[in-house]
Amino acid sequence: MKRLEGKVAVVTGGAQGIGRCICETFAREGAQVVAVDMSDLAYTCENVEGYKLNVTKRTDIEQFIADVVKKYGHIDVLVNNAGITRDALINKMTEEMWDLVIDVNLKGVFNLTQAVAPVMLDQKKGSIINIASVVGEYGNIGQSNYAATKAGVIGLAKTWAKEFSRKGEAIRVNSVAPGYVNTEMMKTVPDKVLDPIREKTMLGRLGEPQEIANAVLFLASDESSFVTGHNLSVNGGLRL
Ligand SMILES: NC(=O)c1ccc[n+]([C@@H]2O[C@H](COP(=O)([O-])OP(=O)(O)OC[C@H]3O[C@@H](n4cnc5c(N)ncnc54)[C@H](O)[C@@H]3O)[C@@H](O)[C@H]2O)c1
C-alpha cells in the first residue's frame, strides 16, 4: 500500500524546488496532487495537476478551493510551501520588501489555510504542513522580514493544531523547518556565505529537496497520526 493512497493534497509553490519535489514524492506515494504556483507549472506526471494561483489573492483562493472540492470531493493534505526572500539589513530594508515577504510567506499561509480549514473540519480529518526555516528558529542577519514570517508559520501551526482539534477532529498541523537546501533560492547565495554554513552543519553539507520532502511525506501520511503542533527541524544539525 502506498503511503498517501486515496489522499488529495494541495501543495503551494509547487512549480520548482522543494515544492516540486514534495509534489512528485506525494504522487509517487499514490496521492492526487494539486500543485499551486504563480509561475507556470509544467507537470507530465499523471496525478499532479497544475493550478496557477497567487497565494496573496484571497478571492482567487476561494474559487480554487471550490474547484478542487468539486473535482476531487475532499482535501486531505495542505502543504504551505510557497515562499520568497527580499534580504537586507534592517536599515536598508524598504517597507516594500517587508510587506511583500509578509504578504506571501505569512499571509499566504493564512489565506490558504483559512480556505481549506472548513473542508477539513467538515471531514473531521486532515494534515496541514507549514514550511518554515532554520532562520525562523534562530534568526539571521539581513533577513528580518523572512525570519519574522518563518517564526510566524511555526506559531500558526501550533495555534491551528489546537484550534482544529478542539471538537475532537483529527486535523493535525505541523511545521517543517529546513536548513539550507540545494534549490534555485540557494543559487543566489555566494559560496562565501554557504561555506561557513556547511561548517556549522553537523553533517557538513547542504540538504537536498528530497530530504525535506521525506519529512513532509511523514507528516502528511497516517504514519504521523499522533504528531501535531510540532516543528520538525530538517537541517543536518545546523545551529545559526
Ligand atoms: N531552499 C532552502 O534552502 C530553504 C531553506 C529553508 C526554507 N525554505 C523554504 O522552503 C520553501 C520552498 O523553497 P525553495 O527553495 O523551493 O524556493 P523556490 O524559490 O525554488 O520555489 C518557491 C516557489 O514558490 C512560488 N511562489 C512564490 N511566490 C508565490 C506566490 N505569491 N503565490 C504562489 N506561488 C509563489 C515560486 O514561483 C516558486 O515556484 C519556501 O517557503 C522557503 O522559504 C527553503
Image (cartoon, rainbow, N blue to C red):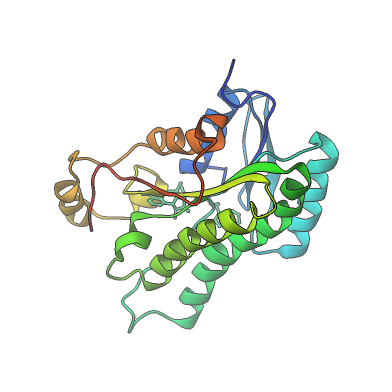
Farthest residue to the top: give it: 1
> Can you see residue 78?
no
Please state which of residues 101 and 30 is positioned toward the viewer in this rendering: 30
Q: Residue at x 66, y 62 (%)?
A: 111
Does residue 141 sit above or below 235 in this rendering? Answer: below
Quarter that holds the N terminus: top right
The mark tally for this picture is 0
As drawn, which residue projects farthest toward the bottom? Answer: 91
Instruction: Indicate whether 220 appears above or below 53.
Output: above
Residue lying furthest right: 70
- Horizontal and vertical percent for residue 130? 52, 52
Please identify the quarter of the rendering in which residue 72 is found.
top right
Q: What residue is rendered at 39% in x and 44% in y? A: 183
Against 47, residue 50 (above or below) is below
Rendered position, 102 above or below 41: below
- Residue 38 visible at all: yes
In the rendered image, which quarter contains the C terminus? bottom left
Q: Is residue 84 left or right of residue 121?
A: left
| Residue 209 image offset from top left, x and y in percent | 40, 37
Residue 222 picture location, percent across and down: 57, 31
Left or right: 36, with 3 as reference point:
right
Q: Nearer the viewer, residue 173 or 102?
A: 173
154 displayed left or right of 182? right
Whether residue 17 sits left or right of residue 182 in the image: it is: right
Q: Residue at x 48, y 39 (%)?
A: 216
Relative image position of residue 20 (x, y in whole percent): 53, 38
